[in-house]
Image (cartoon, rainbow, N blue to C red):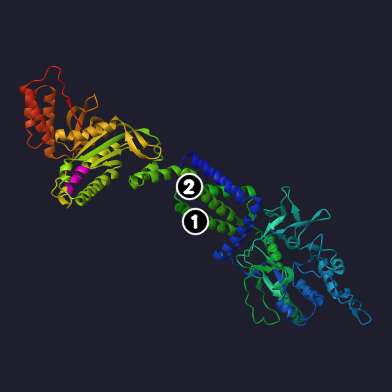
Amino acid sequence: MRRIGRRDIVAAILIALLAGAVFTSPPLRSLQGLSLDILTALRGKIVGDRRDPATSPVVVVAIDGETYDTPPFKGSPTQTWTREIGRVLGSITDGGAKVIGFDVIFPSSIEQSEIPFGDAPLGSRMRGFDRDYLIALRQISDGGKLVLGEILSNDHPDTPYTAQRVAVRNNIRALNVHTDADDVIRRMPLSFSIDGKPVPAMAVELAARAVGAKVELAPSGATELSGYTIPSAVPNTLTLNFRGLGRDVPAYSFADLRACVEKGDRDFFRRAFGGKVVLLGTALNFEDRKLTSMRLASGYDGAPGVRCALPAPASTAQNARSDVAGVFVHATVVRNLIERDAVTELGFPMRTVLTIVFAAIIACAACLLAPGGALIVWLALTAIYTAAAVGAFVHAMALPLTEPALASLAALAMMIGYRFVLADRDERFLRKSFALYLAPEIIETMVASGKMPELGGEMRNVTMFFSDLSGFSSIAETMTPGELVKLMNEYLSAMTDIIESHGGYVDKYIGDSIVAMFGAPADDPAHARNAVHAALKCHEKLAGLNASNAAFVGHGLSHRIGLNSGEAVVGNIGSRRRFNYTVMSDTVNVASRLEGANKYYGTAIMASEATVAQTGDTFAWRELDAIRVMGRGEAIKVFEPLANRGAQSAKQAKVAAAYAEGLACWRAREFAKAADAFAKTANTDPTSALFAKRAQALAANPPPPDWTPVNALEGK
């Protein structure tokens, strides 16, 4: 997980705002409708939400394919059906229906036909054909139980013919629907302005008569029915809730009902239509089909009602379709209003805020994680949110679904692009620059720290590590080129692995020498301790190679290591066309001199007092001497690391104690005592043997009074 800075936070916020604004903008308003479609489909598939059609407050009388294929309607024009329609409507009314609405329009009558028939028009010969039908309409309408339908249009209005309008005393309501830009019906109008006054739509009028209340306009502008405030995301509309996917509304075939009238089964009409709102409409495969928010789930033209007189058609199985008969759209509005179950949608401000928040979460994830991880977060969060949205939709609350999902996906893509172009540019440069000569874990540490090396150099506190094989030139002369290369590759690989595993950076190889630094390019507050640990491990590893590796056996290789800590300039240094990440300063020079000083003292590892000071009490040390290296006027104390504190052997402790005693006498000019102390371990410790010899010489020939206990080393 990468660290994010203020610039990344600002970028994430701006990207989320942009994505949220774009995907909730008016040009993409169709996404809101798509959310309804998806939620309807998911609720239908996951929850099911099946309801008993018998509990429906609304039923449909369907002029269906069976009607067209059943005598006396088969082969007859629909204008001739009116008398039979009147008889069926009368029986439905007698059965206790609350109100009947027409989703079919008869714009003309056979009585109006001007087609010649003999010596007079056909219409004149059919006078009185619709009389019984019109009487039935008048009687039912006078009881407040009938509403005819019409289509309002400035160009081509579709209304019942005049005699019907007179019969129902203009008790007519509009059947117009609200169609979205993608030609899908997701909402239905609540009212229409006629002569400057709001008049309820057909379905609203039927629901109002069923509950015995009037439609009212609240001070807030919302439409109310019997205390129910109808939710309207789009003004003056109701958002349809197809909870049962059409299968929760009973549909009775008009042909069967007509036969039931002939049969005289009044009880059937009471059972089927008592207390119900009835809608008369067509349910055909080719006429008045509507795309609704069920289009992805596939809806049904109602649930087949109980039969009364005719046997069910041979094929009664219903097929789910993307479109449904228009009468079931009106039936859904009636049921939504009576059951107070219309869908509540979030308004534009809340949809936008929710979309922006969702996009911001994913943008932050894309900023923190790798693209693959961010994509997994997007998938997981989208799945969780979708489940929550479906749960809310079960309770008729429609949360935006497509807008947050698509906006967050766009935010994910934009944030990845931002990181590639801007935010991760330094990281890519660092990985490219150090990939071939820095351990992967060190690169990851540098990336995680967020501190990139400055181009051109920067001052850093580091610990320098110099090592060199002792007497390697003479050994190399005895080997073939192949043997030499193999040995060097084995040695340098082993040492490099140890250095890098302790956080070090190998600057260069010079023959058999290794130049490394700790504390750069990655920040490492414990660079001195890690450098000493690495030096001890390298010394231990070389002993193991000499004992077990075939390339080393018989050569007895040994090396010298110098360590020094201090300020140094590190960075990309070189020409404009070619440069290396390296280090320069007096700290580097001193470390190099200490590596060479080991051969004077017979030691393998020598560290400056600056390095010892930065390691605290981690190691057991032996102070070797105070020296003045070539090219530096100031003397420095040098030390030899023995082991981790508390882990030194008894032999190491004995040698260190005797050496410390001798060094104290040496610096006090008590050379004879110093020689005796050094002599105690001179036979096993080359450094003690060196000082015993020097102390004996000075005891025999005392130095002048201005003598200081500082050893000035000549050469490297």
In this picture, which residue range is highlighted in magenta?
537-545
Q: Nearer the viewer, residue 671 or 110?
A: 671
- Please indicate, yes or no, whether residue 178 appears anywhere in the rendered image: yes
**Residue 542 location (% of width, % of height):** 19, 45
Quadrant location of the C terminus in the rendered image: top left
**Residue 399 location (% of width, % of height):** 59, 54
Instruction: Name the residue located 25 percent from the left edge and 48 percent from the top edge.
Output: 493
Prevailing secondary structure class for the magenta stretch in the rendered image = helix
**Image vertical order of residue 15 relative to residue 150, above or below:** above
SS class, disc 1: helix
Spatial separation of the CA atoms under disc 1 and disc 2: 22 Å
Left or right for 715, reference 345: left
Which mark, by number, is residue 379?
A: 1
Task: Rate crowding at label 1 as few (under 14), some (14 to 19) or many (20 or more) other CA atoms within 10 Å.
Answer: some
Counting residues from the start of the chain, the first of labels 1 and 2 encountered is: 1
Q: Magenta segment: does it hold 182?
A: no
Residue type, mark 2 in image: Phe
- Please indicate, yes or no, whether residue 616 appears anywhere in the rendered image: no
Left or right for 466, reference 221: left
Residue sitting at the far right: 119
Which mark, by number, is residue 672?
A: none
**Residue 183 location (% of width, % of height):** 69, 61
Q: Nearer the viewer, residue 125 or 363?
A: 363
**Residue 140 location (% of width, % of height):** 81, 69
Residue type, mark 1 in image: Leu
Tell me the residue that label 2 is attached to. 420
Q: Nearer the viewer, residue 204 or 116?
A: 116
SS class, disc 2: helix
For residue 173, which quarter of the picture? Answer: bottom right
Q: How many marks?
A: 2
**Image vertical order of residue 644 relative to residue 336, above or below:** above
**Image vertical order of residue 318 relative to residue 332, above or below:** below
